[in-house]
Image (spheres, coloured by chain):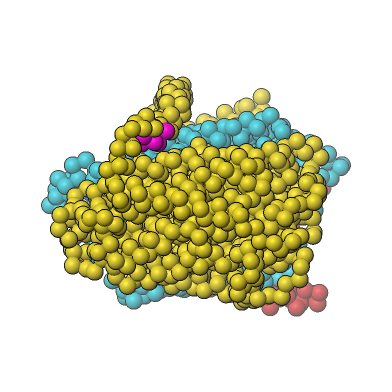
Amino acid sequence: MNFVIEHSYLIPLLPLLGALAAGLLGAKVLKHNSHWPIWIGVGASALMAIVLLVGMLTEHHEPGRMMYFMSHWFDWIVAGDEKTGIFNAAAGAFIDPLTAVMLAVVCGIGFLITVFSKGYMHGESGYFRFFAYLGLFISAMTILVMGDNLIMLYLGWEGVGLCSYLLIGYYYEKPAAREAAKKAFIVNRIGDFGFALGILLTFYCFGTVSFFGTGPGSNTGFLEKALHGIANPGTEVYVFWIPFCLMLGAFGKSAQFPLSVWLPDAMEGPTPVSALIHAATMVTAGVYMIVRLGTLFVGNSNAMITIAVIGAFTAIWAATIALRQSDLKKVFAYSTVSQLGFMFVGVAVLAPVAAVFHLITHAFFKALLFLSSGVVMHATGGELDMCKMSGLKRRLPKTRILMLIGCLALSGFPLLSGFWSKDEIVHAAGGKSLVLGAVMLFTSLLTAYYTFRLYFRVFEGPEKIPGGDHHHGLSQGDSESHGPAAQAHHNPEPLSMMLPLAILAIGAVFAGVINLPFAAGVREHALGHFLQQSPSFAMAARVATAKYGTLTDTDKLGLGQEPTSHVVEVAPLVIGGGAALIGIALAFVLHLQNRAKADELAGRFGSVTRVLDAKYWVDEIYQALIVEPARALGRLFWWFDRVIVGGASFMIGVIPQIGGAALKFSTQRGYLQGYAVSMLACLVLILLWMFM
Amino acid sequence: MAIDLPLAQLASLPRAGWAPVALMILIGLGFAATTVIMSTFIGPGRTGPGKSTPYESGMNPIGDTHRRFNVRFYIVAMIYLVFDVGIVFLFPWASLLAPYSADPATHGNAGNLLLQMIVFVGILMVAYGYAWRKGVFKWD
Amino acid sequence: MNVTQLIIPELTLLAAAALLFLMGGSNAPKTRLLAPVVALLAMVGALVASLIGQRTGVRMDDTGSLAVTALSVYIKSISIGVGALFVLLAWPTSRDGASNRSISFSTETSEYFALLLLAITGMCVVASANSLPTLFLGIELASIPTYIMVTMSRPHQQAQEAGVKYFFLGALSAAMMLLGMSYLFGVTGEMRLDHIIDVLRRPADGPGIGGSLLMLAVLLMMMSFLFKLAAVPLHFYAGDVYQGAATPVTAAISFIPKIAGMTALIKLLYVAGAGTWALDPKLMKLVWIIAVLTMTVGNVLGLLQYNVKRVLAYSSIAHSGYLLVGLATLVHVKAPEQRGDALAAIAFYMLAYGVMNVAVFGVLMLLPAKVPAPARTAETYDDLAGAGWRHPVLGVVMALGCFSLIGIPATAGFFGKLYLLKPAIQSGNTALVWLAVLTMINAAISAGYYLKIVTAMWSKSDGAGTEAIRDTAHDSAYDLGHQAPATERSVPVLAAIALSAAGILAAGIVFPLTGAIYRAAASATAWLADGPR
């Protein structure tokens, strides 16, 4: 572990080198072996991340002591002087339990997905490009979770945003992919603007952008300054606004309402990308950011309420849209938006542990679900419309089991990972507000319903495979046009694709054990106890204690503190499991037993169906409220630019040319005598001027 | 090195001080006159178009100045300059070296002075050698 | 101190030049191929000697005609360093060592490098000159070889014409310098610069010593140095000469005389201000006006050209203008630390300019001309059309060089301009703030032609009717003596381009490096800014 901490820079560096190798050599030299540098780079990073996590887990733990390691890489940007305040964005890692957990998720799942991608992307044009972007993404994501200051966080943040943009637009020949990439990028700009503003305000108020400065206890980082209320004189009023600015960034990256519009469209990217970036890792960056900076948020109840409301609203809103989607990946995309809403609710109700817990389990089962639908897509020749397929279980028996596991976990089926993590969030939300708890519970029910609607439609029932014959990759106009030759006679479930899925499935089933409410082989609330040692959590808990006096058991658990009593509350578990079972049962009835009934029901509630089918017209509202006015403004600016600025620059261009022509034809005629006379004449003029 | 302009001193000198100047003028005039007169007596007295041109350098001094003449004249002139410039530096150096090395205060540095002149002459020799190798002295 | 100890770098270069002249006597291709190696080794040796010889304080020889200071070491080092790049640019690559893509030495390869070394030696002498004769000798030693280099660089009438023009106008400027020096000597009775300062400072004589005669002396010398800089109104020759010479020579003559002239100019104004920069207000105004005129005229004339080398000639005039902006700032500001900033900025800009120049000219000489007369390598916009697509690396370097010359961030040129304008703006002096504004407007104008070069290189078209022209060109069989084979490798030129491109980028992105160079420039010039020694 010491090696890993000492050489922590290797974790982002190795995937980056891999990306460079794949990017520079891929086109000409490596070609179909372009995955190797990424496998090696990301694999090494994953190994380091796991060594780090295991090392920190086995480290002797004293209650109440923070565990962290700081690793300074180099001075990146140093500006300013003593008078104005020194802006120092060092490149360095801050490694605490939160970082270790995030790194393990990012690198571990990232590695599995790169392995999966080899089989999945086989024969694609731009194979190397895909892997280069993937390596770059992992590198940026590790920088994001390892950085010890806001600038590093922002660097990683923008890095993953860039990779997301590049990978959504991977099939850039397709207009839809291009549009989706642009949309993702532009919507994220709105959020990132808020984030940047938040960073500027933080520096303005606290005079530093470092989380913990020279270390917790030194009072040099802004989190600690916020904890002790030490802001630059006269700036206290702005401290209040920092969380709101940062929040905007988090909402953009994590696709919360109303900045969620980009994520469903982002499914135009290759499926492994959807799994890695738009489900498991990048979109959780917003959650990570708020958890990391919890100290700023916890004390600000207005900010917490805002997050809770937005999160809960997004959760139920996206879940309802998912009810009517027929594209597999779209369903999962809305599901992701909804689950991210859960995480934000978790953060907002003083349960960051639950949020991180859900982040981890979600990463497993959602990656599993996306990759499984990728396999389906492979088998059906790029078809993703669940109305056009049915009963795939005979053709894809292994995938069916994996998909079933993923769906059960996502639904919150008792004892699977999603059950435990979702339940914690619902429980904590209920503890704060019954309405909030009820909303989250109902959303869980909806989740179970739409998940199994998909499962029953696709895998059960009479067999119907799109494309007519069993040779896939032949249908035209696919969203991912796989080379026909590449897949035609292949086993649709090759080992290199099934193995990562199996590992993810194991995670989806058992990941819950890391934070069980009771001891079962592992300690109860193990994740909470581990994260509690993170300075971010410890400081957030101190702020919460200071603000609310004594905390309830739920809050203590949510913040990773030791609860007063160890009684396991069974009721929430039963209710949560019940909701999942009801949802599944409903789906069973409507989408397996009696599919006609489902259509009839949809017809009966035509208006609701229309609203849901149109996704609440959010895109249209965007178009009318934001895009059109912006376009009008743009036209105005264009006119201004064209006429006023363009006119001025035209003059800047023309006047010198006229002057130049005058000079050229008067003084630059090529005669030696002329030059000499001109020189002397000018000398005389100068002398005259000087001595007059 | 501060060179004091001697004009002011000259002006204040007594009359006797001008004697060397007068002598110099006399010698100059005398030398010119003597050579001209002597050459008419001793010279072989051959005449002809070539001999009667000034400088006897093979060039016609009368006519349009804007015309071509052989570029070798310039090259030879430049080689002459190599030695001319050499003399300009060598003479003052030579006249300084003797008192310089005689004076015990500066005696130690005389070797250096010699070295510098060797470098200087060496550079001149390089130029001379280069010109020779390039065939400057071949008239054809 | 003994003079030989002070001029080891110069002696190294001189010895190598002498050796090269002797080698020039031989007609064997092997000797010609050996010549650049000798030149490069001499450069490296001189650079090392120059850097090792770095000491604090001023070291003078017995007669006081040379004074080696931190500034001298800095100027020597950058001129030798950039000079080494010029050796790479002119490296003969044909099998008989008589030419490379752009330059045709015929049999005079060794002589060319000897002359280059002599010119660099001249710069070094200027850098440490402490008396009027040494200064004159240095300037002329830096200039005269360049006249010959222009003439011999290619067997074409254009080059001969350029050389003759350059020589005659250079002689005129030398005459002005001598006239000025004689006045300066006449007024002060001293040859040594430090003694002249002492005389000007002597209370008995008063600050007004010499009055208008002193001013006349300063002006005449200044004009001559400005000629070396190709500053307005002594810039007339630049376009013709730069266009006429072969590209590697153009690169050299846009750097060597410029740096020599700028160094001499700084020394002159230091002396004229009696070491305290207390100059006549009218003289200050003159420097300001010349700075503005130089950049504006350079940029404005650059817009109209069709020949890229001529464009770059006017660009180099404009860059002299930017250097003069630094000089104008230097003479206007009152606080010593701001003077230090201005001096450091000038010193930094010299290096940055030299490096960017090598990149741009290097690319130019690797691209073929569409019509192989009068030059084989690219000269016009038409030659460059679409070249970026055929030679992407060269296209990128050219873009980088042009961006740096404009002063776009993330390049060395950006920091060059930034450092130049910083003291001007900080001073709060109205004239200087205006100067800064005019500089920025000029940078915008200059973008007009630099971007034209870049767009030409990356345009999709292949130039108008090129095919036809190329065919007729082949038919006419224009003989240029040593026609370079198409497959000729130009590794040294590529190395020079790579080095300079790396330099531009490194100084633009690696801020610690930029800072280190700037600090070196600042510490080299600090003693000048402080005023009385």
Q: Which chain gets the yellow colouring?
A: A
Q: Give the residue drawn at x 16%, y 47%.
A: C467
Identity of the residue furthest to the left in this view: C475
The answer to which image quadrant residue A135 occupies is: bottom left
Q: Is residue C396 above or below residue A12?
A: above
* Image coordinates for residue C326, horizontal then vertical, percent: 63, 42
* Residue A24 relative to residue A556: left or right: left
Q: Is residue A614 magenta?
A: yes
Quarter of the picture containing the C terminus of chain A is top right
* Residue A299 relative to residue C116: left or right: right
Q: Is residue A463 magenta?
A: no
Q: Nearer the viewer, residue C87 or A30?
A: A30
Q: Nearer the viewer, residue A121 or A469?
A: A469
Q: Which chain gets the cyan colouring?
A: C
Quarter of the picture containing the N terminus of chain A is bottom right
Q: Give the residue drawn at x 61%, y 54%.
A: A571
Principal SS element in the magenta part? Answer: helix
Q: Is residue C1 above or below residue A570?
A: below
The answer to whether any part of residue C5 appears in the image is yes
* Image coordinates for residue A197, horizontal then vertical, percent: 62, 40
Magenta stretch: give its range: A609-616
Q: Give the residue drawn at x 66%, y 69%.
A: C53
The answer to which image quadrant residue C450 occupies is: top left
Drawing shade for chain B? red
Q: Nearer the viewer, residue C475 or C335?
A: C335
Identity of the residue furthest to the right in this view: C204
* Image coordinates for residue C10, horizontal then vertical, percent: 58, 66
The answer to whether any part of residue A144 appears in the image is no
* Image coordinates for residue A639, horizontal then vertical, percent: 42, 22
Tell how many labels: 0
